[in-house]
Image (cartoon, helix red, strand yellow):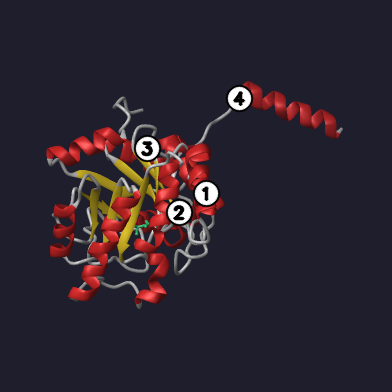
Amino acid sequence: MSERKKVSLPALFKKMDDGEPITWLTCYDYPTAYFQEQAGIDMILVGDSLGMTMLGYDSTLPVTMSDMIRHTQAVRRGAPNAFLIGDMPYMSYQPSNETAVLNAGRFMAEAACDAIKLEGGAEMAPRVKAISNAGIPAFGHLGLTPQSASALGGFRLQGKGAQQAKKIVDDAKALEKAGAVGILLELVPDRLCKLITERSEGTIIMSLGSGPDAHGQLLIYHDLFGLYPKFTPRMAKVYGNAGEVILNGLKQYVAEVRDLSFPEKSNYFGMKDEEYEQLEAMIFKEEE
Ligand code: KIV
């Protein structure tokens, strides 16, 4: 198990102030969390993207708080020292400040999170304020916000035009004023991300597919390793094709069981002759 110090909010702010890029990945299960912890990742997001990457839904909308809590608990067990952020699922915060605070509190109390993330701009500033006032660090999420994919016209670049870009700039300020400790910019043009980062007054700005000029980078874990069979978005860099390795291994397993080359001697255990003879004698006696 890793012996590194727990990543705290002040440590993240220091990285931002020192110009040291912050590393962030999504994660949904214990073994992956273990590896991410060993790799020294700063922040982990248990994203509601697990609806697509882990549960096979076509969107994030069916994901529930129970789904999120269960996966977040597993991730915390694998990564005790990373800064852990729970992603508020659809309708866990939109209805009211009270719903938002109660569900954010569940992430902290039941899954040992360090912060939560929610989607939306100025209209969600009251939620961010209420959660922050309850002593829970909140991250905002602007640009492509998957819970609103239908309203946004699909999974596409946001803030291409000046009007829409200005709204994202204003939204970022509204979230900052409401007390957001960080804001994720997903799939906005690089110059818009740079502008928002330069105008930030102490809020950590993170980029997902929004270029290099934020305080750090986020990627979806499954995209790094070819583990999402439906597609790999352009914003992702593939660091290894684990999906291919797994598929080849599975095909080989199926073939080896069928042609009897698995299991090999090293994959199972024998029994001493005398014990086996005694066993046979006992059975024989019973059957007499
Ligand atoms: O659910 C998630 O993983 C996210 C990312 C797309 C940022 O919110």
Tag 1 secondary structure: helix
Rounded to the nearest angstrom, the CA distance separating label 1 from label 2 is 8 Å
Quadrant for the N terminus in the image: top left
Other residues around mark 4 within 10 Å, as few (<14) / some (14–19) / many (≥20):
few
| Quadrant the C terminus occupies | top right
Q: Secondary structure at mark 4?
A: helix
Q: Estimate how packed mark 1 is, as few (under 14), some (14 to 19) or many (20 or more) residues with alpha carbons within 10 Å.
A: many
Q: Quadrant of residue 163?
A: bottom left
Numbered mark located on residue 34 in the image: 3
Left or right of 89: which side holds 188? left
**Where residue 67 appears, x then y in whole percent?**
53, 52
- Quick one: label 3 or label 1, which is nearer the N terminus? 3
Q: CA distance from mark 4 to mark 1?
A: 61 Å
Whether residue 242 is visible here, answered yes or no, is no
Spatial CA span between label 4 and label 2: 60 Å
The numbered dot on residue 88 is 2
Q: Amino acid at mark 3?
A: Tyr
Q: Which residue is mark 1?
A: 103
Which residue is painted at 35% across and 78% down in the image? 153
Disc 2 marks a residue whose amino acid type is Met
User: Which residue lies at the image location 18% right of the left edge and 57% below the top edge?
Assistant: 196
Q: Which is nearer the N-term, disc 2 or disc 3? A: 3
Q: Are dots 1 and 2 in contact, CB under 8 Å?
A: yes
Q: Amino acid at mark 1?
A: Asn
Instruction: Using the image as rendered, state which of residue 184 and residue 220 is in the foreground.
Output: 184
